[in-house]
Amino acid sequence: MDRKDFLAAVGVSAATLTAISCAGCKKSSSSGNSITGPTGVNFTLDLTLASNAALLNNGGYLAINEVLVARTTAGAYVAVQQSCTHESYPLIYQANSHQFYCNNHGSAFTESGAVLNSPANRNLTVYNTALNGTSLRIYS
């Protein structure tokens, strides 16, 4: 093998190793739009339990089963996926601003799950809610 063939072989090997090592570096972000909420959601919260007490007050919220359940300032219940569609960081509910917010990169979503500002560019998965006495059902 002469010097030219050797350098060509080393170059191909280096390029292959670089491609393989970078393949695992791709993160789920807004460019991939692969972050969605759970499917087949169907659970009921007993609002008389202390663990669900946050939902007794307008503006309260809690995260359960990968779903963020909130009670709006108007008293309605809303439920969305718990993770931001940008990079899957947990969301919080900001009742006074009527939005779900990601503390990590600043994405915000309306109470109906629509993107308010980037870097997220995909809406949240929204779930149905049904109140029956002191039982709150969240379902797809």
Image (cartoon, rainbow, N blue to C red):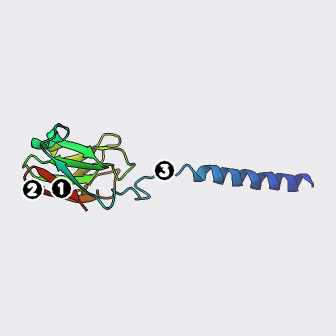
Contact between labelled residues 1 and 2, with CB atoms less than 8 Å apart = yes
Of residues 43 and 121, the one drawn nearer to the viewer in this rendering? 43
Q: Nearer the viewer, mark 2 or mark 3?
A: 2
Badge 1: how crowded within 10 Å, few (<14), some, or many (20+)?
some
Q: Position of residue 26 (x, y in %)?
A: 52, 52
Q: Nearer the viewer, mark 1 or mark 3?
A: 1
The structure residue drawn at horizontal position 25% and vertical position 62%, both measured from the top left corner, is 140
Work out whether 123 lies above or below 63.
Answer: below
Q: Which residue is mark 2?
A: 132
**Element type at mark 2:** strand
How many angstroms separate mark 2 from mark 1 (CA)? 8 Å
Work out whether 55 lies above or below 31.
Answer: above
Counting every numbered tag in the picture gives 3
Q: Is residue 82 left or right of residue 48?
A: right
| Quadrant for the N terminus in the image | bottom right
Residue 27: mark? 3
